[in-house]
Amino acid sequence: MTNSSHWLSPVLPLTSFGNVLMFIFSISLATSIIVLNVSVSLSILLNKALRSENRFMYMLSTCLSDICSGVSYYYAGVLDVRDSFDSPTRTFYIVPTFLGLSYMAILAAQADRYHAVVSPFKYSQLMTRNRTLLVIFVYWVYAFLIVAVYNLVTVGMAKRVTSMGTFVGNIFTVIIMIGLNVRLFIIARFQLGREPPSEERDSKRSSVYLILVVAVFFLGTWLPIFSHIIVCNFFGSTCYSFRNEGTDPLRILPRVNAVLTPILYIRGCSAIRATLLTRVWRHCCRKKKRVMLDESECARKSCST
């Protein structure tokens, strides 16, 4: 098979009903990721009150990286692509970086909520909106600096650095994320429960519960591939690999999480949901309805003539 034909071939040969369903699923997954994350991003950008809160900046960062993941999945998931260092269809480590950025954003959001609830006075003085944006900017730049390093060194060196860095990084970050989850749950369940009822307490509790649920779903969809990588690196063996990215369930699950995360944001935050229904989707529906009315008017005029 030539490189040109390989690039244009679908994730599986469209020779059976099951393969066609897999192809449709891949397209639907990429489209759902983009539509849902763009909707949440617009809801945050169009609402000034949401833009003024730090936690929504982390949500926006998650949505932006997931949008990039969705767009790239039209290539990495819909087509017959194997994204490894020595593959002719590789993405030069860019596509996995978008997934990693979502991971970093959720981890940073957990730490942000923890400090906001535990030390609210110190947090309000230290973490201004500009500093929050600086944190987000730093981990985006860091992620792509790593991509640049991987692409500048030899393939053998990149594999060694990736295996060791991923092994250590996955273990520590998963432990940190689980630890923050437990700590945030204790805070939401007991510490905030002792405070007198107020709007501020309810806002804190809802924000903590939201990031808790998001992190739990995140771990549920990412732990299988983390465990796979850790076990393979620990034993130094070559684990079983699927034909391509679009048929590997361990790599599909993180993309499913990119659909679940904006749904959880919409479900768990009334401000996002209200803006989405009144300013984003309603506007799109009106525009679509106007186009349909114009088309019907044109058809009626053509029929009358």
Image (spheres, rainbow, N blue to C red):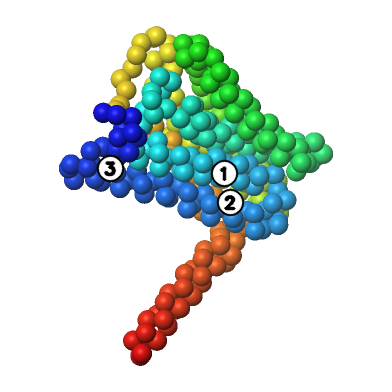
Return the mark for residue 22: 3
Mark number, residue 41: 2
Tell me the element at label 2: helix
Image quadrant where one finds the N terminus: top left
**Relative to the observer, which residue lies in front, 231 or 295?**
295
- Left or right relative to 179: residue 18: left
Check disc 1: other Cα within 10 Å, few if <14, some if 14-19, many if 20+: many
- Residue 91: % across, % down: 46, 30
Q: Is residue 290 above or below residue 43?
A: below
Q: Residues within 10 Å of mark 2 (few under 14, many from 20)?
A: many
Q: Are marks 1 and 2 in contact (CB under 8 Å)?
A: yes
Residue with the most extreme bottom position: 304
- Residue 153 falls left or right of residue 224: right
User: What's the amino acid at mark 2?
Assistant: Ser
Earlier along the polypeptide chain: callout 1 or callout 2?
2
Q: Secondary structure at mark 1?
A: helix
Residue 159: image location, x then y, percent? 47, 14
Measure the C-alpha gap from mark 3 to mark 2. Answer: 28 Å
Q: Quadrant of residue 118?
A: top right
Point out residue 176 in the picture as x, y percentages from the top left corner: 58, 25
Task: Give the labeled residue for mark 1.
Answer: 64
Q: Nearer the viewer, residue 8 or 91?
A: 8
**Can see residue 225?**
no
**Can you give x and y, in whole percent of width and height, for residue 218 in the image?**
48, 36
The earlier-in-sequence mark between 3 and 2 is 3
Residue at image coords 41%, 81%:
298
Q: Is residue 228 left or right of residue 191?
A: left
* Horizontal arrangement in the rendering, residue 23 relative to residue 206 (left or right): left
Residue type for callout 1: Leu
Kind of residue sitting beneath label 3: Met
Q: Nearer the viewer, residue 6 or 168?
A: 6
